[in-house]
Image: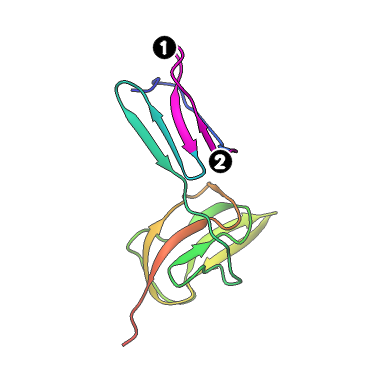
Amino acid sequence: MLMPAIRWALKIMVRYCEAQRTKNKSINFYADLEHITFFSKERTLSFVSPPKATTSKSNALDETSFTAPMPAKIISVNVHAGTEVTAGTILVILEAMKIENPIRATKSGVVETVFFAEGDIVEEGEILLKFTPAEIN
């Protein structure tokens, strides 16, 4: 186990970095823009950052993704994986500069994945959730 009872917060600001074991108290890791991996003799932990994308006017990157239009705090997540929604349903509410910004479904469908939780801070362009549009017969 990697150093129990200690919490780490890292923000990777470089394209690539790597650390090697120097003493018993060091943490070994490898990081790039999308992944960070911590490793020791006993175990390895890997994390992947949520994907980022360019936003469009409607906050729907395409028919399957909704993105943050600006840096903001998530104040409400109204759906979870598997939730069926109709066009216009409020999926997530963001707060930026004391203004609430609802992210609405542009079509009916089912939520696949929600990448963030209430209280999380998101950057502009980060994908908030994945969505499967309903099939039109």
Q: Are marks 2 and 1 in contact (CB under 8 Å)?
A: no
Q: Position of residue 120 (x, y in %)?
A: 53, 47
Q: Is residue 79 left or right of residue 60?
A: left
Q: Amino acid at mark 1?
A: Asn
Q: Position of residue 24 (x, y in %)?
A: 41, 12
Residue closer to the observer: 38 or 5: 38
Q: Is residue 57 left or right of residue 29?
A: right
Q: Is residue 5 visible?
A: yes
Q: Position of residue 132 (x, y in %)?
A: 37, 70
Q: Residue 109 lies in magenta, yes or no?
A: no
Q: Is residue 85 above or below residue 70?
A: below
For numbered disc 1, what is the local secondary structure? Answer: loop
Residue closer to the observer: 87 or 129: 129
For numbered disc 2, what is the local secondary structure? Answer: loop
3D distance between C-alphas at marks 2 and 1:
27 Å
Label 1: few (<14), some (14–19) or many (≥20) C-alpha neighbours in 10 Å: few
Mark nearer the N terminus (2 vs 1): 2
User: In the current view of this chain or complex, which residue is farthest to the top?
Assistant: 23
Residue at horizontal 56 percent and vertical 67 percent from the top: 59
- Where is mark 1, residue-wise? 24
Q: Is residue 4 left or right of residue 68?
A: left
In the image, which residues are magenta?
13-31
Based on the displayed image, in which of its 4 quarters is residue 35 positioned? top left
- Where is mark 2, residue-wise? 15
